[in-house]
Amino acid sequence: MPILKEGQLEVISYSAEQTQRLGARLGTLLQPGDLVCLSGDLGAGKTVFAAGIGKGWGASTLLTSPTFSLIHVHEREADQQKLYHLDCYRLEGPADADNIGLDDVLIGNGPLVFEWPERIKAALPAERLWIDLRVLETTRRLFNFQAAGPRALALLEAFRGSANG
Ligand SMILES: Nc1ncnc2c1ncn2[C@@H]1O[C@H](COP(=O)(O)OP(=O)(O)O)[C@@H](O)[C@H]1O
Ligand SMILES: [Mg+2]
């Protein structure tokens, strides 16, 4: 995996399965309060990646698209931690963040995974792991990771390191 610079990483996935595995690698590293933003067009692979995160993290339920419910809360048995999976597609701006009780969600006891975070970007904490997904070809996706803040930086470095482990 090429290193651009600290706090950034680009990865290419060649299949949905590979995207799931990438997500799982990140999921195993997530801690309460971690914010992962998955940005990119419809069909880019955000939900596939999120499902991988859920697997790696240890969710007892499968992560599916929360497009209609805005938020799915998953639990893991080991420590009753929660994982918050949100889809902001239907939100029109930061003011709508109130509709989902964003403040309550952000202080929740678990990691947070957002799809369509750009919809409410101004309402999101600045410290986060932002991942842009771009469709290159039918099954090829470019992942661009950008970490902001010390915890997100540590998370990204751990993720980078786990590729070689
Ligand atoms: N490399 C890849 N990574 C992720 N998904 C892929 C890839 N190649 C093909 N796909 C397909 O693209 C679709 C992505 O869907 P989804 O994850 O729901 O997108 P999004 O949540 O970004 O709208 C799935 O049907 C998946 O099988
Ligand atoms: Mg989706």
Image (tube, rainbow, N blue to C red):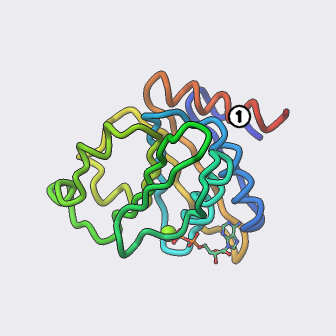
Quarter location, residue 128: top left
How packed mark 1 is, by other alpha carbons closer than 10 Å (few <14, some 14-19, many 20 or more), is: some
Q: Residue at x 61, y 60 (%)?
A: 51
Q: In the rendered view of the protein, which quadrant contains the N terminus? A: top right
Q: In the rendered view of the protein, which quadrant contains the C terminus? A: top right
In the foreground, 4 or 13: 13
User: Residue 135, how many percent across, how many down?
Assistant: 61, 68
Residue situated furthest top in the rendering? 150
User: Residue 112, how many percent across, how many down?
Assistant: 44, 46
Q: Residue at x 67, y 29 (%)?
A: 158
Q: Is residue 52 above or below residue 150?
A: below
At label 1, the amino acid type is: Arg
Q: Residue at x 70, y 59 (%)?
A: 20
Q: Is residue 25 above or below residue 68?
A: above
User: Residue 154, how many percent across, how many down?
Assistant: 58, 24
> Which residue in the structure is indicated by mark 1?
160
Q: Residue at x 44, y 31 (%)?
A: 148
